[in-house]
Image (tube, grey):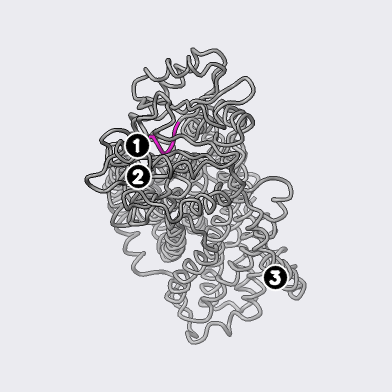
Amino acid sequence: MLIRERETMGRLTDWVLAHRRTVVLAWLLLAVTGGVLAPTTIDRLGFDFSTPGQPAYEANEAIVGEVGNGGGNDPLLVTVALPEGSTVAGSQRELAAVFDRARQPGWRVATPFDGSPGAETLGAGDDRTAVALVWPPAVEGAAPYAAALPQLEGALTGVTVAGVAPVVTGTPVLAEGGGDERPIIVEIALGAGGAIVVLALVFGSLLALVPLLVAAVAITTTFLLVLGLTALTDVSFIVQYLVGLIGLGVAIDYSLLVVMRWREERAAGADDLTAVRTAMTTAGRAVVFSGVTVAISLLSLVVLPLPFLRTVGFGGLLIPLVSVLVALTLLPVLLASAGRRLEWPRRRPPAAESRSWHRIGTTVVRHRWVAALLATAALLVLALPVLGIRLGSPEVTATATGSSPAATAFQRLTADGLPAGLARPVEVLTADRDAAVERLAGVDGVAGVLAPEGPGWAGDGAGLVGVVLADDPSSTAGRAALTAVRDAADELDGARVGGTAAGDADSVRAIYGNAWWVLPLVCLVTFALLAPALRSIWLPVKALLLNVVSIAAAYGITVWIWQEGHLTDLLFGATATGTLTFWVPVAAFSFLFGLSMDYEVFILSRIREGRDAGMSTDEATVHGVAHTGRLVTSAALILFLAFVALSTVPVVDVKIFATTLALGILLDATVVRGVLTPALVAAFGDVNWWWPRRLARGR
């Protein structure tokens, strides 16, 4: 099998080199077209995180259909923080006049003065802060109130109460930077800047530009394919970051593997064409298996019951596949045509074997059991916080950071004792509002139930009540209260519970309650791919186990940083989120599983080569680490910097995702692939190479 695979790679390389002009022109056409149309691709990406078929989604659709607003969109909060000496009761007339300015046709409003039973939760008596909840009609896109927000702010311009101007806040405007968007090219430029520094240190010549060129072609071509995908289905805006930054890292990783093997062969005396052919039949083969492994891991997202995660899976699936195609076709042409000239100013290729990594490999192999136990213990300790993981949306306080007017207004609101659940009320659609108010007001954890008689609160045969929780619905207490509200609503005839918090709870259940079989499926398919490639039963099993432990450690540190709030202020200028965004663990697993397996394949393929050349297991292990340690470290550092660039995106959810990916890659390239992998290969000796005899005949 190995001989046939290498012959296939050799024939492909021969064909590519015989048709250089065709290959270059084809990729140039795709890259230019993709680059020109990239803005169109980005404009066609969607921002829908809904979960069709789930109870909260159906309730939210019914709410919007009944009253034209609310449902899956949280309200805007018009807040007035009165100066010392003033109270809500004493300023009622002026406050009511200000809040009345928010009443527009088609808008739904709740104020402290509506006469609703729970209106006092919006400010009353001696309180110094008053709030009006405003639900305008939403539009599609990143900002659901893009049309309504300027209209509301314009209506409030120039009015004051006791000398204080009202401020509009709420989850739709509390995104970092006020929700401002910036083009993806900013993050790509940051990631590419870090990559070029690492590549310059690795190559010391113009050859450092080759992986960047390959990445540019892969990224723009993938954007072109994503544009085609948008014609078939809605594609999440998250895909642009995955294509831009994970595409950057993956394409450079694959190029790095091939180029370093090409330089190694040249240093051993091979001519340019022979060096290219050998690099493609060895490193190129590893690239194929790595890319397919990443693609398989992303299939786990495709089978999940959430449309936006499916599109992330499909979009992400394109990244490694296109990167592999570019590395197998365009890269050998570049190396054969201009590789030698690009070695300037370093004319002499460096030694293929890293002395530092040779020493590390020798030390780990010599002390294999100690190294394995220490590395495993470290990973398990890092993974411990994952036992307390909570999934949902970040608490509102995590986005209400900084000194922006919206953030300051929300901070003042909660500091003055108003319920933290005001920003994300639970909405209940019911035919009997009086019965709903009476039943829900007595639920533990409910601060108040709003049921104004104003426009937008009732439709044909059904009406709305807004349930304000005492705590943020993403907090432990808030989640318990939400569950209690849903249980109480089940006792009401025909009542349906909606709102974003209920939607989050349904999303968590849809992803993690019904898709437990995805992890075993991905592991099984990956094993079926890697076992014949490595001609070993134990090596892929070990690789899968190490991946799971490594990813668990990355989850644990992310929980410690974001959910529990350690280092969030220092690293991101944010506060604890209280929860991790519900889609982050499954999406991070899909990417980390495949990307981590990349490095495992790189190392194990080289160890396998040494073993096939007649080395003992210990010698082959040191040989593999010495020849791939520098490669894996450089590749991981490039990906790490790409994820650091991703963490600068002004969206908390994306920051959490980037943190998980960055930590996962860092742990994997150091503790797992640098220590645990060689230690276990050395520890199990000849067991690593067991392969059924009847399969061995197929070689």
In the picture of the structure, the residue carrying the numbered disc 1 is 420
Against 344, residue 374 (above or below) is above
Looking at the image, tell me whether mark 3 or mark 1 is earlier in sequence order.
Answer: 3
Q: Tell me which residue sits at (46%, 51%) in the image.
A: 156
Q: Residue furthest front?
A: 93
Magenta stretch in the rendered image = 421-425
User: Which one is closest to the eye, mark 3 or mark 1?
Assistant: 1
Against 622, residue 259 (above or below) is below
Against 632, residue 498 (above or below) is above
Image position, residue 262 (x, y; %): 56, 72
Whether residue 538 appears in this view of the structure is no
Amino acid bearing label 2: Thr
Q: Which mark is residue 539?
A: none
Distance, label 2 to label 1, CA atoms, is 9 Å
Q: Are marks 3 and 1 in contact (CB under 8 Å)?
A: no
Whether residue 350 sits left or right of residue 288 in the image: it is left
Where residue 402 sits, quadrant-wise, is bottom left
Q: Residues within 10 Å of mark 1 (few under 14, many from 20)?
A: many
In the picture of the structure, the residue carrying the numbered disc 3 is 32
Where residue 687 sits, quadrant-wise, is top left
User: Which one is closest to the eye, mark 3 or mark 2?
Assistant: 2
Distance, label 3 to label 2, CA atoms, is 44 Å
